[in-house]
Amino acid sequence: MLDTLEVVTTVVVGLMVGVEFSVAFIMNRILDALPEDSGQLGHAYGGRMLGALMPFWYIGSLVLSAIWAVAGWHHHGAGLVVTAAGLLIVSVVMSMLLLVPINNRNKTWTPDNRPADWKQQLHRWGRYHYLRVAVIIAAFTLLVAALT
């Protein structure tokens, strides 16, 4: 049973890392290169779509990691799993304090109602997102290492 939990947790966190990596290094660059208002509208749509999905994915990844840490407490790699869960907590806190407030504003913007500093706000979100991606990559790496 613990083996299944380990694999499921690692796959769920790995997929989350892949999505967030793609947003940071592929999707945002595509959206920023679109003409006129298309990029901003794409960012707003992405904020609505992923903003509805990602909280469940982040919390689910954290819960799975915590269950693994408790269930595997006396097994090899438990410290790595606990540290990974700690990093996932950091990613959730970062999301709530830094990224979600910007995303909540962004997802309501249209070319008619967006603020004058909308590009700066999206760039700030992007910088925070890069940092969050680094945190979840570190958590994923620790989970993979705990498998060995």
Image (cartoon, rainbow, N blue to C red):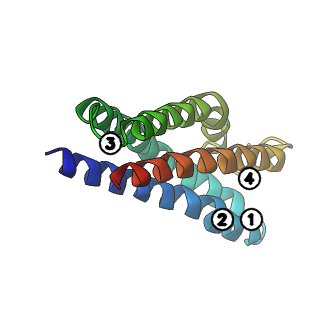
Callout 2, which amino acid?
A: Phe
The residue shown at (61%, 33%) is: 94
The label nearer to you, 4 versus 3, is: 3
Look at the numbered disc 2 and give the secondary structure of its residue: helix
Which residue lies under the disc numbered 4? 111
Which residue lies under the disc numbered 3? 76
Q: Is residue 29 left or right of residue 145?
A: right
The residue shown at (27%, 54%) is: 7
Q: Is residue 38 visible?
A: no
Q: Earlier in the sequence, mark 3 or mark 1?
A: 1
For the residue pair 143 and 107, the one nearer the viewer reads as: 143
Callout 4: 10 Å neighbours few (<14), some, many (20+)? Answer: few
- Residue 29, percent across and down? 71, 67
Give the image quarter of residue 27.
Answer: bottom right
For the residue pair 24 and 145, the one nearer the viewer reads as: 145
Which quarter of the image is occupied by the N terminus?
top left
Q: Is residue 91 left or right of residue 7?
A: right
Callout 3: 10 Å neighbours few (<14), some, many (20+)? Answer: few
Look at the numbered disc 3 and give the secondary structure of its residue: loop
Which residue lies under the disc numbered 2? 25
How far apart are labels 4 and 2 at the CA level? Answer: 25 Å
Q: Earlier in the sequence, mark 4 or mark 3?
A: 3
How far apart are labels 1 and 4 at the CA level? Answer: 15 Å
Which residue lies under the disc numbered 1? 32
